[in-house]
Image: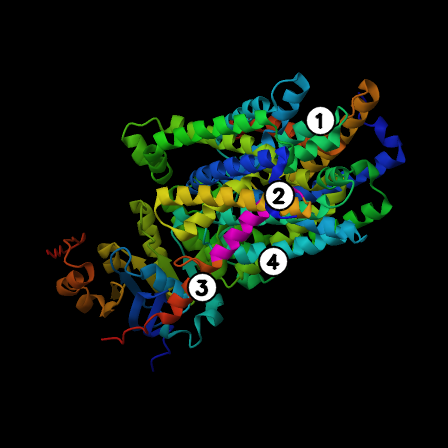
Amino acid sequence: MNLFDPFTLPYMQRALLEVLVLGALAGAVGVLVVLRRLAFVGDALTHTVFPGIVIAHLLGRSVVAGALAFGVLTAVLLTVLGSHRRVGDDAALAILLTSFFSVGVVLISRTRGFTADLTVFLFGRVLAVDRADLAQTLAVAVVATLVLALLHKELVLRAFDPEAAAAMGYRTRALDLVLNLLIALVVVAAVEAVGTVLVIALIVVPAAAARLLTDRVAAMTAVACLLGAAGGWLGLAVSFEVSVDHDLRLAAGATIVVVLVGLFLVAAAVAPLRRRMAAR
Amino acid sequence: MEPDPVLVLRRATVAYEREPVVEGVDGEVSAGQSVALIGPNGAGKSTLIRAVLGLVPLTSGTIEVLGRPPQAARRQVAYVPQADTLDPEFPVSALQVVLMGRYPRVGWLRRPGGADRQAAQRALAEVGLAERASTRFGTLSGGQRQRVLLARAIAQEPRLLLLDEPFNGVDALSQDLLLAALGRLRAAGAAVVMATHDLGLAHLACDEVCLLNRHQIGFGPIGTTLTPELLRATYGGQALQLRGDGVIVARP
Amino acid sequence: MSLLDVFGDGFARRALLEAVMVGGLCGAVGVHVLLRRLPFFTMALGHATFPGVVLAALAGISLFAGAAAFGAVVVVVVALLGARERVDDTSAVGVTLSGAFALGVLLLSAQAGFSRDLTAYLVGSIITVGPGDLVTTAVVGAVVLAVLAALHKELVLGAFDRGGLAALGYPVLALDVVLLLVIEATVVTSIPAVGTILAVALIVAPAATARLWTERLRATMALAAALGATSGVVGLLISLQWRVAAGATIVLVAAALFAVSLVVAPRHGLLARARTISAAPGPTPAG
């Protein structure tokens, strides 16, 4: 199996660039998601952008624009909800995300081609990525990287010690909103490539693996980006080679996620050895 | 000529829904002074500290920090929480935690510079942990973590320092180092307010005491305020003992 | 055409029965999910049973059995992963959820008929429920409710005070596993009705709504079951009338009941709390 051959084709090159950028971006944002144990929030966001996608699609507008509108709306809602612990945050979150998702399903169920459309939105079509999609992803990546770099120390402080952050005068809700918006941005960027269901993997898995391998946030971020990009490349290559050589159609997005989880398991196996070596 | 007090409380009251959590707190703390907040669990000590930090609103009365409302004075106020409220798995080193105290100075969008790192190193040295600068925070002992949090506050160079049960579960060596560092802070002009159960340490560390049991029972110099009758009123008649030179036992 | 005429058709009658049974079951189990703060885990379970369904379809065995078996595997994996240091529970669930789901998608994409089966699995297809499914639901429901009734006091104590339960000599881990399997069985049973992504809503929302109205645990479970069944019926009726996806409509009804209760419930609702705060007497003057 050759992991470089597939990328002589132009559409594979575009797909590769897309997953490299997405993987690195999601990995970086994922570090904060993992440190703050926000995987559920991230997952909620992937479900709540769905009606935005459906509405945009039904109106003939850009799917990404629809996702963005609902992503921002949800980020704001989540930030507001986050500070009112009433029913139990997880319960309210679960109800919120399934309601939004249901709205999307109801809307789309009235159209023909229901099932095909649903599949595309949920799982993406990375091999159909065109130049415009790539440009969008790059733009989002630039914005998100800038925000992360500029606000890094404040976001980490809030993750580690929210009380001290508040005592020092930082508005933790504003910082939370920034992170929620960043997650929403990543979800929106990934919608067309890997779909809403699988993007949570891009966000959580590389960062969780990186956490096993290092004790420093800076290193964790670098490793997460690397793993995210590597997963994208390997997943694409493997799915292509298997489809060509063994005539077995493997969905590209899903292959990427399975590769990432595989990398996570490797990291989990290696971690105790690393710790023993470091202790010597 | 007496300089203006650092912290002024006038009939401060905090209520949550219907119930007052702490009410009628009245007193002043000047530069270099140290006040112990003493009272049983649920007395409102932590709530009062949060009110001074501007984290919870007052229902009535006023709090002024350096002549301003609490939210306006945050850069001059440092907070030392209990170390066990923090995630022990978080990937930060001791030095990185202390550096966090410099953030208000560094400001948004910028990274801490050489001067900040030196200030952080000095603060760590003050609490006797200079050689542990790159150790992960969560692997330090309870007392060491508490010292790191004090170092973070020192690095902030505050005018007012608020501590919540700083000696809980802390080993004797760490206690001594904490006390010494607090003494140096006071000598440099900072005012200190600490909530504590430990009456003996209150004697060692503080010159004034505020007795709280949801309302204020006394606020004044330790010698005249930390008396058996007032203690009995604060603790509702429970038996208690002091370590140190004297033993005061208040029985129901 | 009146709404009731609809139930002349066999499929509609079966769908109605399924909606009542699944709604009631989910409501009762949901109370335990809330007690132990397991909504995220429940959602992950729904996603993670997917490969089991696909494998079962490929092997030609009961989809329910495949989903149930795989779900049990997932329960164990999550427990093991979460027990390691450095992997917190939330991330462990996130990794397992996405890994298992991707695996299922992979398996399914390798054969034809991708879209249609997938959709039914994801968002439910209650109007194609057959008599066999009804029997399965009834049996599973009966077993689950019997287990919950038999172990009620142990499960409640375990949710509230695990240490206390262990100190009394109970096998805490075994009881945990029993409950997780109960949740898993409920999720799998709900799939024909509302699908895997939405199952968590039917489990969590009626229970969350019930908690806003009563503080007594058994009353909460009864109310949750009633609300769940009601959401099922009303949602199904609306979806048949307007010809939209049934599972999603059921979920929206359950969510609407929750939202309304959040505002109007007599003690815990938003209006009630606002009234309490404004009626509070002023602070007593300092002595």
- Dominant SS of magenta comes to helix
Dot 1 and dot 3 residues touching (CB under 8 Å):
no
Determine the chain carrying the residue at label 3. C
Q: Which residue is mark 2?
A: C5
Q: Which residue is mark 1?
A: C108
Which residue type carries mark 2? Answer: Asp
Q: Which residue is mark 3?
A: C271
Which residue type carries mark 1? Answer: Leu
Which residue type carries mark 4? Answer: Val
Q: Which residue is mark 4?
A: A76
The answer to whether marks 1 and 3 sit on the same chain is yes
> Could you say whether the residue bearing mark 3 is in a helix, strand or loop?
helix
Q: Is residue B127 visible?
A: no
Determine the chain carrying the residue at label 4. A
Bounds of the magenta segment: C245-262
Determine the chain carrying the residue at label 2. C
Answer with mark 1 or mark 3, whichever residue precedes in sequence. Answer: 1
Whether residue A102 is situated above or below residue C179 in the rendered picture: below
Dot 4 and dot 3 residues touching (CB under 8 Å):
no
Mark 4 vs mark 1: give the one in front.
Answer: 1
Which residue type carries mark 3? Answer: Leu
Residue closer to the observer: B76 or B215: B215
> Could you say whether the residue bearing mark 4 is in a helix, strand or loop?
helix
